[in-house]
Image (cartoon, helix red, strand yellow):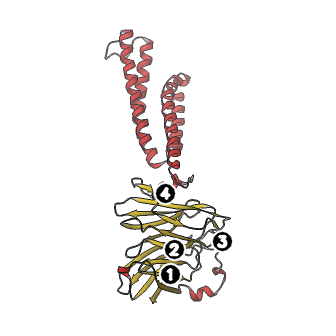
Amino acid sequence: MPWVVLVAVLALLQFVAFGALVGRARGQFGVQAPATTGHPVFERYYRVQYNTMEQIVVFLPALFLSAAYGFGADWMSAASFIGTAGVLYLQGFGGLAYILGWTGGYCLVALLLASATIVGQAAERGTDPLDSPRWSDMRKEMFPASAKVVFDERVKVTAPLTAENAMNVPVSVDASALPGVREVLVFADFNPIVRIVRFEPTGAQPSLGFRIKLQQSTPVRAAVRTSDGSWHVGGTWVNTAGGGCTLPSTGSASPEWQKRLGEVSSRVWARKEGGERIRLRIIHPIDTGLAAGIPAFFLQDLDLTDDKGKALMHIEGFEPIAENPVFTVDIPVARASAGYRVSGRDNNGNAISAVIDK
């Protein structure tokens, strides 16, 4: 948006400059205001300035609308073509003088806007520590336009440099070095389904281990929203042969999963840092819906509570979670409980419920 403002200011300065040229032409050719006719050269100056005034009332709103909603290129090109055709139809080829007058100034503005956009995108990409060509798209897709987004080394994303099995890639996210964590969103730049998992550590540590599907080599990122509304982003590259999102799950071909769908197994053990670690495994085939003839079928919501029903963590899953998902959650000392409860559902409404005893 700052570049758009710059272009708008340049357009206004161009209009002011044309007004000054008209004033100079009045003195040069002896045409006193408010007269608008006289010497032919003066009339050309005046007509250019008047044409600019007519067009700028359309140009400036169109500029800001196209910047805000991203539809400018096609619609503005169509409008320019229709306008050009209309002038030639009404005035014949003599109207080309007006068209050239409009086009000269606005081509300069368009070149400045294009150059500024290219420079801005290059600068934005240059700030990405993973140097992904998709980062600018991720920035627009994942966060509100007004949100503050910063790359932060305190957000740790751990994954293998090379994943041998693209359908089962272990990933862990740790944002415990950040204060006031409200939610964490995990996504992969080059996955056909970008979002992977979102979790809210209401009582648990702001960390989570899980397994995912990757379609190709990609940055895997975690975006952490803190209490001040800022987003802190960390990530790592994962190289893989790919295909993890478009292959059917191995479990969907077996009748056994239907009998065990939603079955939860768990383990709880003490951490040397204090508190407890819980590992959950849920029987579920998890299909992305990208394999031919197999609809999307995935874990949608999962809640972990203590033995008194107080929330510890809410997990929202998306299609690229690996089948038979495994989640690892850390519980701080102050929230350790005599037991825990898991509840949730998949996108077809199948319930998941289990009590975790130590």
Q: Quadrant of residue 248?
A: bottom right
Q: Is residue 58 visible?
A: no
* 3 and 2 marks in contact (CB < 8 Å): no
Residue with the mark numbered 3: 165
| Cα–Cα span, label 1 and label 4 | 31 Å
Local packing at callout 3 (Cα closer than 10 Å; few below 14, some 14-19, many 20+) is some
Q: Is residue 281 left or right of residue 357?
A: right
Q: Nearer the viewer, mark 1 or mark 4?
A: 1
The x, y position of residue 185, in whole percent, is: 47, 65
* 2 and 1 marks in contact (CB < 8 Å): yes
Local packing at callout 1 (Cα closer than 10 Å; few below 14, some 14-19, many 20+) is some
Please, what secondary structure does the residue beneath circle 1 have?
Answer: strand
Front residue of 209 and 184: 209
The x, y position of residue 302, in whole percent, is: 46, 78
* 2 and 4 marks in contact (CB < 8 Å): no
* 3 and 4 marks in contact (CB < 8 Å): no
Give the mark nearest the N terminus, 1 or 3.
3
Amino acid carrying mark 2 in the image? Gly
Q: Looking at this rendering, what residue extends furthest in the front direction?
A: 272
Give the mark nearest the N terminus, 2 or 4.
4
Front residue of 295 and 238: 238
Give the mark nearest the N terminus, 3 or 2.
3
| Cα–Cα span, label 2 and label 1 | 9 Å
Q: Nearer the viewer, mark 3 or mark 4?
A: 3
Residue with the mark numbered 1: 279
Q: Quadrant of the C terminus?
A: bottom left
Please, what secondary structure does the residue beneath circle 2 have?
Answer: strand
The x, y position of residue 328, in whole percent, is: 50, 77
Give the mark nearest the N terminus, 1 or 4.
4
User: Disc number at residue 209?
Assistant: 2
Residue with the mark numbered 4: 141
Amino acid carrying mark 3 in the image? Asn
